[in-house]
Image (cartoon, rainbow, N blue to C red):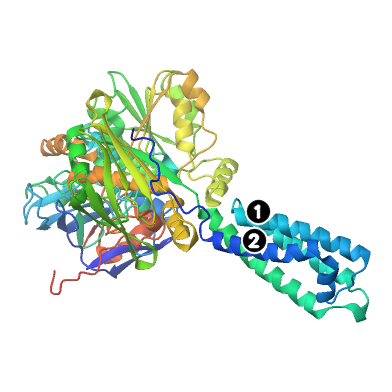
Amino acid sequence: MTGDARPTAAAETAGPGGRWARGLGWLSAGLGLPLVAVPGHTLRLLGLDDSAAARALARFVGVRELSQAVGLVRGRHPAGWMWSRAIGDALDLAAIGYLGGRAERRSPAAVALALGLTATDLLAAVRVTRAARTHGRIIRAGASVTVNRSTTDAYRFWHDFENLPRFMAHLRSVRIIRPGVTRWTANAPAGRRMEWDAEVVADRPDRVIAWRSLPGARVPNSGSVRFTPAPGGRGTEVRVELTYAPPGGRLGRAVARLFGEEPAQQIRDDLRRFKQVLETGEVVRSDGSPSGVSVHRQALQRPARPRVSTLAGER
Amino acid sequence: MKAVCWMGRNDVRVTDVPDPTILNGRDAIVRVTSTAICGSDLHLYDGYVPFMRKGDVLGHEFMGEVVEVGPDLRNLRVGDRVVVPFPIACGNCGACRSGLYSVCENSNPNPGPVEKLMGHSPAGIFGYSHLLGGYAGGQAEYVRVPFADIGPIRVDDSFPDDRVLFLSDILPTGYMAAQMCELRPGDVVAVWGAGPVGLFAMVSAYLLGAERVIAIDRVPYRLRLAASYAGAETLDYEQVDVLDALRDLTAGRGPDACIDAAGMEAHHPSAVRYAYDRSKHAARLETDRPYALREAILACRNGGVVSVVGVYSGFIDKFPMGAVMNRSVTIRSGQCHVQRYLRPLLDRIRRGEIDPSFVISHRLPLREAPRGYEIFKHKQDECTKVVMTP
C-alpha cells in the first residue's frame, strides 16, 4: 500500500528534447521525399552531377531520410535517431565530395546545406541525449534508524508535518493548508526555492505514514515512513523511503545533483537528526558544524574553533 | 580568548580565537582552570589522525568553573566547579542508557566520514578531529560543554585541581583497562606502555585484585615510576625479549591479562621490523603500528584477556588472529566510558586510595603549550604529564 512509492504526475512523454526531435523529423521528410521521387531534379537543383550512379545514391539517401523522419516524429528513443542523423550527415558530406570530385562540378550550395544540417543535427543530438539522461530517471532511496522512544512518540512527531524541517536539511517549511494537504517549501539550487503541495495517502497510527505530491509539482515525489517496535525494548525502528521523478532539462539535472549523488546518505543524515530531536530535544551542534550538517558540507567544514559572536559586548 | 590551535603536523600555536557561545540548550560554558596534554593529543600532533583542520582547538582533559548555562540545563549553576569527561554523551540514546557513553549515538553531528572508516560512529570528543564531531577543545581559556547535565561532575574546593583533573580521561581510562581484565585472585597483569594511562592501569590492577603487575616500556624514568608508584615489576623491551621474559616470570603460563596502553604509535626494538611498519605508517598504507598489541596477544595465556585502551585509528596488518582464535583469547577494548567511573573514582580519591597527581611532571602556563607538546612528544626532561593553566 505504501512501500510502492510511485511518482504521481506522468512526465511529459518526450520531454524537452521532443520538440527538437519532431522538428528534425519533418525536416528529414522534406529532404527525403524529393530525393526519392525526383532524384535527378533535386541533384541538378543542388548543382550536383545527375549521373545514373548519383541518382541511385540520392534515392538511397532519400530512403534513409524518410525512415529517420518516421522514427523522429514518432518520438521513441529520440536520442538514438538524432545520432543516426548526425552520422548520415557525415556520409552525405563524403558523398558530396565524391560526386563533386571534379572541381568544375563542385556545388557550394550542396556543401553549405550539408554542413548546416550536420551542425544542427549534432547540436540537437547532444541536447536530447543530455535531457534523456535525467529524464525518466526515478530516484529511489531509503534509510533507517533506531530511536530510543516509543512508536507512538515517533509517529506523533512525524505526523505533525510542520516538524519535518527541524530535521530534514533541504526543507525550509511545511505548512498545513487543509486537512491532509500540506505545502512544502524546499531549498533549490542557486539559493532558489521550490514549492509543491502534497497529500497524505496512508496513515495508520503508530505504524505508517505515506504521502505524495499533488499534480503540478515540478519534481513529483512521494515518501513513506514506517514505525516498528525494536526488539527487546530498544525503542522504535524508523524506515523511510523516498522517490523523486526529476523532469528533464536543467531543473532535472539540478535535482538529480541535489538528491542523486548520495540520496541514502542524505536520508540517513535526516534520520539521525530526527533521532537527535526525539532523544535529546534538538539537533546537536558542534563548533565544526554549528548550523547542523548537510551531506554536501561534510568535507568542507570550518575549523573546530568557536564562532565569532554576533552579539556585541558578549563575554 | 587564548586557545591552543592545531596548525598542522608538529605545529600547535596559542592564538586568539572567539569566545565560545551556547549553541544547544543543555550547554555550559566552562572557564578552564587546569588542562592537560594527553598522549592521544600526540597522535594529532604527529598528524596521524585524519580530518583535522588548521585552526582546530585542541584538548580533551580539562576542568574549571561554570560561567554560563544553556536554558535547558538544570543541574549546574554558574560558579560550580566541574571536571569534564572527554567523550560527549547525550544520556538519552540506547548506548548512553546502557552505560556505553563513549559510543553515544547522538553526539557526533557529522557521522558520515567516520561511518565510512569504522562502520558506525563513536561519540564526539572534545578537540579530536572532525571525524569525532569537530568540537573545540579545552586547551583554552573557555570551552563550550554540550550535554553538560550528563558529563561534568561537580567537585568541592577541598580537592585541588591536580587530584581530580585526571578524572576527565586518563584515570578512568586506566581503571577501565584493568576492569576489562575481569581479574581474579592470583592474576598476573602485564601492561604495555608506562605512560600516564599505563601507570593508572597498573595502580588500578592492584586495586582490583591483581597478584602481580609487570610494566613494559623502554623509557627508564617511566619504568622507574612504574616500579616506585605503581609497584610493578619492569621489563625494558630494548634489553630483553618480552615474550621470553613474560614466559619466565609466569613459569610458562603467560600473563592472565595483557593491557595495551601504548596504541598506534608503538615502537619495536628490531630496527628492521620497526622500519617496516614505520614506513608503511608514514606512507599511510597502514594507519597504526601495532607492535604492543601483537606482542600482548602472543604473550597472553590461553583463555586470557587482552584489554586495549591505547588509541588506534584505522587499520593494522599482521594481526595474529590465529593466536586469538585457537587459544581462546578475549579482546576487550573501547574509548573509556568516563561518565560511569566518575563517582566511584572520586570516592577512591577522597578515601586516599589513589592520588593521581603523581604522574604530573610539568606545570606550564597555557601560552607555553608548544613547548609542552615538544617535551612530551620527545620524552625530554623526564616528561610524563604536562598540566597547563590558562
Q: From the top left corner, tell me how far across and down residue B76 is, in percent.
A: 8, 50
Kind of element beneath mark 2 = helix
Q: Are marks 2 and 1 on the same chain?
A: yes
In this picture, residue B61 sits left or right of residue A106: left
- Identify the residue at horizontal 56%, vertical 40% (top origin): B270
Residue B203 seen: no
Task: Examine the image and state in which quarter residue A100 appears.
Answer: bottom right
Question: Which quadrant is the C terminus of chain B positioned in?
Answer: bottom left
| Cβ atoms at labels 2 and 1 below 8 Å apart | yes
Image coordinates for residue B48, horizontal then vertical, percent? 45, 51
Read off the residue under disc 1: A71
| Residue B236 place in picture, x, y as percent | 44, 38
Residue B60's disc number = none
Q: Which residue bears the numbered disc 2? A: A25
- Kindly identify the amino acid type of the residue bearing the numbered disc 1: Gly
Query: Marks 2 and 1, how far apart in space?
Result: 7 Å
Neighbour tally class for label 1: few under 14, some 14-19, many 20 plus, Cα within 10 Å = some
Vertical side of A303 occupied by A200: above or below: above
Dot 2 amino acid type = Gly
Label 2 crowd bin: few (<14), some (14–19), many (20+), radius 10 Å: many
Please, which chain is the residue tagged with disc 2 on?
A: A
N-term-proximal mark, 2 vs 1 = 2
Left or right: residue A275 compared with residue B289: left
- Judge by depth and name the residue closer to the eye, B193 or A197: A197
- State the image quarter where residue A211 is shown: top left
Instruction: Work out whether residue B213 can be spotted.
Output: yes
Horizontal arrangement in the rendering, residue A59 relative to residue A65 (left or right): right
Quarter of the image for the N terminus of chain B: give it.
Answer: bottom left
**Chain name for mark 1:** A
Instruction: Pick the residue in front: B228 or A11.
Output: A11
Q: Nearer the viewer, residue B171 or B64?
A: B64
